[in-house]
């Protein structure tokens, strides 16, 4: 699996509720998954303004948007967007072969 697959899995909830995430929650969740849960996601994090950051996450989000697997949802009055998987993205995430324990760890970090 590549790091975009991990990002797509992180963005794809197990229920349709709370589908969209802001960039800070995405970054925090991926960081905690890699540090606390020990899953190698392929991102290198460094200290930044609002906590750990990997600018590759933004590149991969843009790529997933371009591929139609993730949608950007504008937030009125803000300079940032929310991100949510499209139906194609959810289907792609479901097709990835990942141990159930890894999916549960991603889900736990996503919901914190």
Image (tube, rainbow, N blue to C red):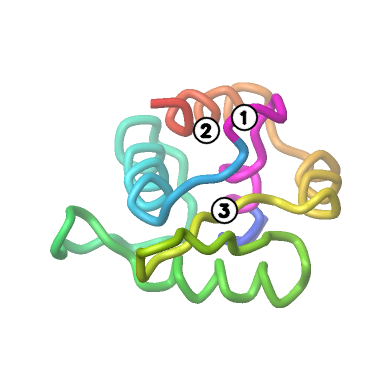
Using the image as rendered, state which of residue 19 and residue 43 is in the foreground. 19
Q: Position of residue 79 (x, y in %)?
A: 36, 70
Q: Is residue 15 magenta?
A: yes
Residue 60 numbered mark, or none: none
- How many callouts does the rendering have? 3
Q: Earlier in the sequence, mark 2 or mark 3?
A: 3
Q: Position of residue 42 (x, y in %)?
A: 47, 60
Query: Which residue range is magenta in the image?
Result: 6-18
The residue that disc 1 covers is 103
Using the image as rendered, state which of residue 95 and residue 18 is in the foreground. 18
10 Å neighbourhood of mark 3: few (<14), some, or many (≥20)?
Answer: many
10 Å neighbourhood of mark 1: few (<14), some, or many (≥20)?
Answer: some
The residue that disc 2 covers is 106
Q: CA distance from mark 3 to mark 1?
A: 12 Å
Q: Is residue 52 magenta?
A: no
Q: Earlier in the sequence, mark 3 or mark 1?
A: 3
Residue at 50% of width from left, 26% of height from top?
105
Q: Are marks 2 and 1 in contact (CB under 8 Å)?
A: yes
Judge from the rendering whether residue 73 lies leftward or rightward of residue 95; answer left or right. Answer: left
Task: Name the element at disc 1.
Answer: helix
Residue 7 numbered mark, or none: 3
What is the quadrant of residue 112 in the picture?
top left
Judge from the rendering whether residue 60 lies leftward or rightward of residue 43; answer left or right. Answer: right
> From what the image shows, is residue 83 above or below residue 15?
below
Q: CA distance from mark 2 to mark 1?
A: 5 Å
> From what the image shows, is residue 62 above or below residue 33?
below
10 Å neighbourhood of mark 2: few (<14), some, or many (≥20)?
Answer: many
Residue at 78% of width from left, 68% of height from top?
68
Residue at 58% of width from left, 60% of height from top?
73
Q: Quadrant of the N terminus?
A: bottom right
Task: Name the element at disc 2.
Answer: helix
């Amino acid at each position: 699996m590549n790091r975009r697959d991990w990002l797509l899995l992180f963005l794809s909830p197990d229920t349709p509720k709370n589908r969209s995430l802001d960039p800070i929650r995405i970054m925090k969740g991926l960081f905690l998954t890699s540090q606390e849960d020990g899953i190698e996601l392929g991102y290198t994090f460094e200290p930044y303004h609002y906590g750990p950051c990997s600018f590759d996450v933004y590149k991969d989000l843009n790529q997933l948007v371009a591929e139609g697997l993730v949608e950007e949802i504008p937030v009125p009055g803000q300079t940032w967007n929310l991100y949510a998987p499209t139906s194609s993205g959810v289907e792609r995430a479901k097709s990835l072969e990942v141990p159930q324990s890894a999916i549960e760890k991603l889900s736990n970090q996503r919901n914190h």
